[in-house]
Image (cartoon, grey):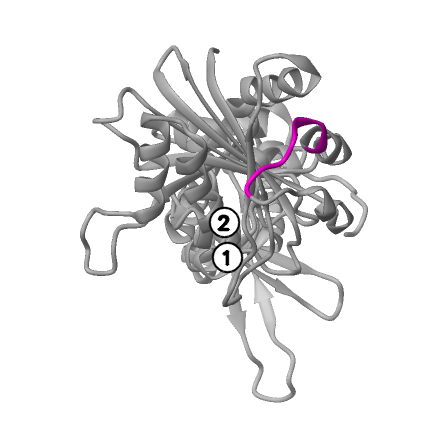
Amino acid sequence: MPISRIHSYLVHPSKNEKKPPVIGGIQIPHSGKLFGMLAKIDNSALSECDIDIVFRPKANGKQENDCRDLMLAYLAKPSLPLGRAIALRLQGVTTKRSGLGLLFLIAGQDQHGLRLLISRFPAETGVMAEEHGQTINVEFVEKVFMKSARSYKSALFRCTSIQAGFWDGLVVDRQMIDTRGSADYWTREFLDSNLKNTAAAGTKRVAVALQEALRATTDPVVRQELINASQLMPGRHGQITSAKKIVQDLSLTPSAAEAVESAFVRPELYDSTFKFDRKEFDACLLFRSVELDNGVVLTAENTSFGDVIHEERPSQGSKTRFTTEGNIVSERLRKSR
């Protein structure tokens, strides 16, 4: 995938600073070890960046976004000054907790048209003495980069032309120590974007697909596996995930995984990312479970729980009596959770 320009900038943590430091920058030559490693990151960006985002419109509803404008201006004519405007935006939202960062802007083309990859790597404050005003040298950039080549944040944007532009993109955050997906300051503040799929919509799709899979399956073992999965899913509250990732994380059998995937009307939604919302999942939850102090757990579809399991409270005492009947379709021993 041809790369037209690579610019790099040293970005200081300057949020709420009245006089932020000058940003040093440099154009990276199309040769050498540093270029080779950046080219590899650029080539793998489409598979690495797996969180869908969309630029936010103005508060008044106008389809305008300042961050998008800066990126399209740079992509139209990649230059050190236009790239510095993007770096200034990042510097303005970077806190001391995030620290000093090395920003790369990689402009190029692929089979679909123009593309822009923005990547930030952590840097050590001890190397700041090597800055020279608005410039830095390649050796310095390479030294900083090599120390953190596997720890970075990236955002990828593609469009057929500058006139067509782009309103969505993909991000990845390899610096996160948990599974939330991407730092808020990177996605929301710097890129002025939201997740493309809302938490409510994404979570509801998973719940509905699970319900359809349960209704369609005739295998009692698969059915029980899906019921167990539904009881574990709420533990993903607040995580950036997808239906495919949930299925993989729960190590569902191929039959159960296929049942869930087949329940998605649009196949691409199976791999679409969203933030899991336990409240939304509970609202769509298929099952109601009652655990008794004698070790018995009763589980049935929430909408029909009262029809298949009858609840009776004796006139005296605090105990509750549950009764149900049906044909045994599966019986096995298993370890307690």
Question: Do tag 1 and tag 2 residues touch (Cβ < 8 Å)?
Answer: yes
Question: Which residue is nearer to you in this view: 264 or 317?
Answer: 264
Residue linked to disc 1: 93
The spot of residue 53 in percent (x, y) is 41, 41
In the rendered structure, which amino acid carries the disc numbered 2? Leu
Q: Residues within 10 Å of mark 2 (few under 14, many from 20)?
A: many
In reply to whether residue 111 is colored magenta, the answer given is no
Give the left or right position of residue 327, taking residue 88 as reference: right
Q: Residue at x 40, y 25 (%)?
A: 267
- How many circles with numbers are drawn on the protein? 2
Which image quadrant is residue 38 in?
Answer: top right
Question: Residue 153 sits in which quadrant?
Answer: top right
Residue 269, x across and y down, in percent: 40, 32
Range of residues picked out in magenta: 134-140
Residue underneath mark 2: 90
Q: Nearer the viewer, residue 237 or 334?
A: 237
Name the secondary structure under disc 2: helix
